Amino acid sequence: MTYKVKEIFYTLQGEGHHAGRPAVFCRFSSCNLWTGREADRARAICQFCDTDFLGIDGPGGGRFRTAADLASAVACTWRGELHARSRPYVVCTGGEPLLQLDAAAIEEFHNEGFEVAIETNGTRPVPPGVDWICVSPKVGAEFVLTRGDELKLVFPQRGLDPEQFSDLDFSSLRLQPMDGPELLANTRAAVEYCLAHPQWLLSVQAHKLIGIR
Ligand SMILES: C[S@@+](CC[C@H](N)C(=O)[O-])C[C@H]1O[C@@H](n2cnc3c(N)ncnc32)[C@H](O)[C@@H]1O
Ligand SMILES: Nc1nc2[nH]cc(C(=O)O)c2c(=O)[nH]1
Ligand code: SF4
Ligand SMILES: [Mg+2]
């Protein structure tokens, strides 16, 4: 299996439950809910995406012929010291990582000593072995991943009531204001929602505020 990867970089997780945690981000190319081309955005199922995931031309990106090659590139990107309190951490994202991430890659990440997290839109099943599953459902897309660790809902989405999701089997529920022209209003609405529904915690995209990737 060849893996197509847009970029691999070391930064802090900016979002959700693990915000602030150092991680290697492995951004897989392509998504099943948008082509990634601006010309197609208005017809896409997911229209608010904040990410360039097209191609393999980002820092550390490329085609990796084997799972071991991919894991080795991720391991080379980790810059933290080894410490008993924390294992190296890789966040598999995209695009939609579940179009490519398979059991072999997860096993090789583990062999390199990594804890493996995923950011997914919830339309595909997760192979076994992933240590932290963060699901972010999109209105109009199928939704098969009804359990995981973290449900991170971009808010607001037209026709989507967070309470549709609050009884599902996730230990962490997050509302993340939709970035874009309405970010300020969306943030205010998300704050109000969390104040009234304390089962939901706010997720701000901290990396954007502090100017890291
Ligand atoms: C770029 S996506 C890649 C992973 C996967 N395709 C997904 O949608 O979960 C990573 C995270 O960014 C969130 N996201 C994308 N665009 C956003 C935006 N405009 N505002 C806030 N969050 C956004 C997604 O919902 C997801 O939680
Ligand atoms: N710092 C940082 N944190 C993130 N958390 C989820 C991200 C993503 O694009 O999946 C992301 C990202 O792109 N950068
Ligand atoms: S599902 Fe994720 S990667 Fe795909 S377009 Fe939406 S936010 Fe972007
Ligand atoms: Mg991002």
Image (spheres, helix red, strand yellow):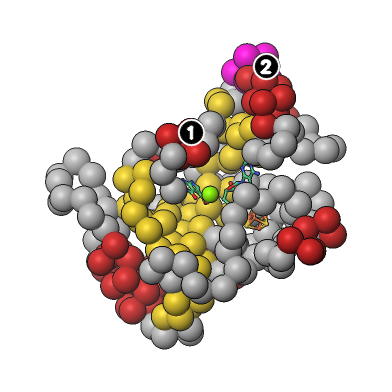
Q: Main secondary structure of the magenta part?
A: helix
Q: In this rendering, is residue 69 above or below 177? A: below
Q: Nearer the viewer, mark 2 or mark 1?
A: 1
Residue 25 in view of the camera? yes
Local crowd size for mark 1, using a 10 Å CA cut-off: few (<14), some (14–19), many (≥20)? few
Mark drawn on residue 96: none
Does the stretch in magenta take in 42?
no
**Residue appearing at x 51%, y 74% in the figure:** 56
* Element under disc 2: helix
Q: Which residues are magenta?
A: 193-198
- Give the amino acid type for the residue marked by disc 2 in the picture: Glu
Q: Earlier in the sequence, mark 2 or mark 1?
A: 2
Local crowd size for mark 2, using a 10 Å CA cut-off: few (<14), some (14–19), many (≥20)? few
Side (left or right) of 1 relative to 167: left
Given residues 108 and 23, the one toward you in this image is 23
Q: Which residue is tagged 2?
A: 192
Mark drawn on residue 209: 1
Q: Position of residue 33 (x, y in %)?
A: 72, 61
Q: In this rendering, is residue 155 above or below 58? A: above
The CA distance from mark 2 to mark 1 is: 20 Å
Q: In this rendering, is residue 97 above or below 164? A: below
Q: In this rendering, is residue 29 above or below 85? A: below
Side (left or right) of 60 relative to 202: left
Residue 73 image-quadrant placement: bottom left
Q: Position of residue 90 (x, y in %)?
A: 37, 56
